Image (spheres, rainbow, N blue to C red):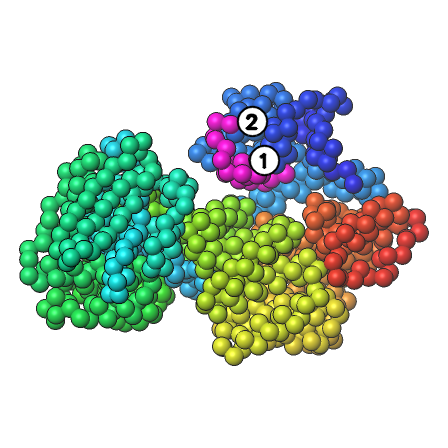
Amino acid sequence: MAHIHRFGEFRLDAATRELRRGGVPVPVPPRAFDCIVYLVEHRDRAVGRDELIAAVWGKADITDGMLGQTVLSARRVLDDTGKEQQYIRTVFRFGYHWVAPTEWVDEAAERAVETAEPAKATSEPAAAGAAAESKIEASPPPREQRRRWRLPVVAALGVLALLALLWGGNHLLRRSALPASTAAAQNGGRVVLVLPVATSAGPGYDWVRLGVMDLIAARLRAAGVPVVPSDNVVALTGSKIDNQRPQDFAALAHTAGASLVIDAQAQENAGRWRVSLRTVHGESTPLRADGEAADVLGAARIAADRMAQQLGYAPAADRSSGGDANALANLLPQVDAAILSERLDAARTLLESVPAAQRENPEVRMRLAHIDHQAGQLDAAEAGYKAIAAAVSPERDAVLHARALSNLGVIAAQRDDNELAQQRFDAAIALLRREQAPDALGKALNGRAAYYSAIHRPDAALADLSEARVAFESAGNLLALAVLDSNLGALDMLRGRYAEAQAAFTRAADRFATFGAHAMELNALTAVAELKLAQLEPDQALALEARLRQLIGQVSDPARQRNGELTRLQVLAANGRLRTLDADLERVLDAARREDDRVAVARASTLAAELALARSDAPRAAEYAGAAAQRFTSIADDPHERLRVGLLQVRARLAAGQDSKDALAALTSFAEHDGSASARFHADLARAEVDAAAGDDGGAGKAYAQALAEADATRIPLDLREAARAYAGWLIGKDDLAQAGAVAERVAVWAARDYESALLQLRVYHALGQPNLWRIALARARALNGDREIPAALQIEPKPR
């Protein structure tokens, strides 16, 4: 099937890679051609630079300059100057937007079916979508939406991501002399990474590997040296207590954003400790610094200060004052080592050994509160953070006071007290903006951005995430940047910007994979897979299935495993891989029921209902859909899933000959409460099918048309396909074939990769009596059906009309 884009004097054929002007072929450089095609095919929105680079080159290591040259070549081909920008408009600080009026036509179908001009079909819904989105953002959201802390596709990530951001090991309590980017600029652009300490000491000293590493990093940081955060290093090198060294220091440095890597060795001999530091990457002549003392911490301080001097910095003053203060200073690195290696019980035991008087120390309190927070003991954690905020005034230590407020903001958000969360984040951010503490500022901004997304203020959330990105980049915290990308992806999903969301989640997943953060990678990759399904790219989602399966086996949290497994099964179902699907789905459903995992039960029941309905087992579909609807009623996190299952329940009951009035009323009520374009789409499509089943052609036709327009407004291809599939099917039944063809044309662009879109094309060409087009459509459907059965009637060649 020849798909042609027309604009001005040009005709663009992506399939044959040909651009013609007035019927004459125009030579186009390959990358410039790919750039034009991608911008034309995504002309309903602006395309970000990163997205365009990924689409054209398939990799990220392309400079903005190279992209700019390619866009310039594309403009020259079109006689489009950078000043006029009649075709490709530059979107400042973002990317590019195809702005020329463009028609998309299927030339073969055009000869068979009279259709409306595609340009109008594209532009009007896009304007409606923009208006609808503006209306949603401008008005207060319904209570159901306000409760959402994270979008469902990353629900498991929310609290984990926030806690990971709000705790950074021992450096949580230590302020850098300068932000990492500023210090790096003063240090010739060098950022230092300190490796875990290798030691041959016996039992009782396993904490040295990470505790002394963090101490050395903190001493260097206090002297003004830009240092990679310890939690980033642990994630990259592993937290096992052994003496293995990374084999490729250059690759490690590149991944962590460091230019200098320091190896550390600690040895005990005759009651004395020797700590030796040596640069193993970044210096042509290695730098060395040694320290000796009666205890390993003292030796590490001496070695770190000497290394700081070799790097051109003055060592930080030692604030230890002897006695209990020294004892506490020696204990805290052991605690931090346990926290960094996620041995929270061991960390708590160490802290509980501190004398009662020392437990009031803010550094002890902060660590205890963090351990309580990680363990889910919110009351104890809140009491600890409040005690720190009360004991340490902003005048005494603004950064520590602000960190306590940030953590209190997270707890308030976890309890759905968004107003209190905002107050705490606001206070923390106001303090941190006056201090040189970019890492802490980034974490507080990330927390407030999550709050803003919960109350449906995406513009405010985006502003905070943008500022947080600058802060994390300044601090050199790459792991925090990965979490931020996940949150940005969730925000883009909320804004209906699925392509941008997919790019953000992909960046996050890649970074998490580098750090070995399997749980977070699984969450991000799950989001990518679901976004690809929503954008009708099932083949691309299938390419992720093997990695999803691998990650599911690497995480220990059963809830996360189930969430990942259900997404994996959705991907298989969308690709027609059905042979073991029922058994796998039943296994997940049984486990979810045993654990009373309401979200997993609801998701699994929804998928089971869809599969049953596709097999024409309507009673079973109605049973599963009813169970899913009942579960989703008590889950506030996922309005879209609730809408989806509401529509599914109506369809299943209609197919089973059951009364669907209650299901339709419940869906309509929820849609009115939600107020979004997606909600109206689901309710109107359900109403259309009820009216159609009742023989109310006038009501059905009006509702179908409304649903199609609203699906356009959602900008979600999956919604548009569902509306077109139902509407066109009804029109074929009414023998209104011209209108059915026009409706089906709305999803023809996806027929080459999405089975249901291909099947719709097959139905239309069969009904139209177009044997040649029917054969093409049948071949395409057979290439995509997998284990699904194409209806026998559609496989019989139609008689020409």
Query: What residue is shown at x 70% (from left), y 40% (from top)?
Result: 118
Q: Element type at marker 1?
A: helix
Q: Gap between marks 2 and 1, in whole Å?
A: 10 Å
**Residue 797 place in picture, x, y as percent:** 90, 53
Q: Give the range drawn in magenta.
A: 39-66
* Tag shown at residue 56: 1
Q: Which of 654 and 688 is in front in this view?
A: 654
In terms of sequence position, does the residue under pointer 2 or pointer 1 come before the other?
1
Residue 98 percent across, percent down from the top left: 58, 33
- Neighbor class of circle 1 (other Cα within 10 Å; few <14, some 14-19, many 20+) is some
Magenta-drawn stretch contains 52 = yes
Question: Do the CB atoms of the residues marked 2 and 1 lie less than 8 Å apart?
Answer: yes
Check disc 2 and give the amino acid type. Answer: Thr
Counting from the top left corner in percent of width and height, residue 597 is at: 50, 73
Q: Quadrant of residue 75?
A: top right
Estimate how packed mark 2 is, as few (under 14), some (14 to 19) or many (20 or more) residues with alpha carbons within 10 Å. Answer: many
Give the residue at x 28% y 32%.
285
- Determine whether, in the image, residue 194 is placed left or right of residue 656: left
Compared to residue 351, the image places residue 731 above or below, namely above
Q: Can residue 468 be seen in this view?
A: no
**At label 1, which amino acid type do we have?**
Val
Extreme residue in the front direction: 270
Instruction: Decide whether residue 787 is among the magenta residues.
Output: no
Occupied quadrant, residue 126: top right
Where is mark 2, residue-wise? 70
**Which quarter of the rendering shows the N terminus?**
top right
Percent from the top left, x then y, of residue 348? Answer: 25, 69
Image position of 187 (left or right of 391): right
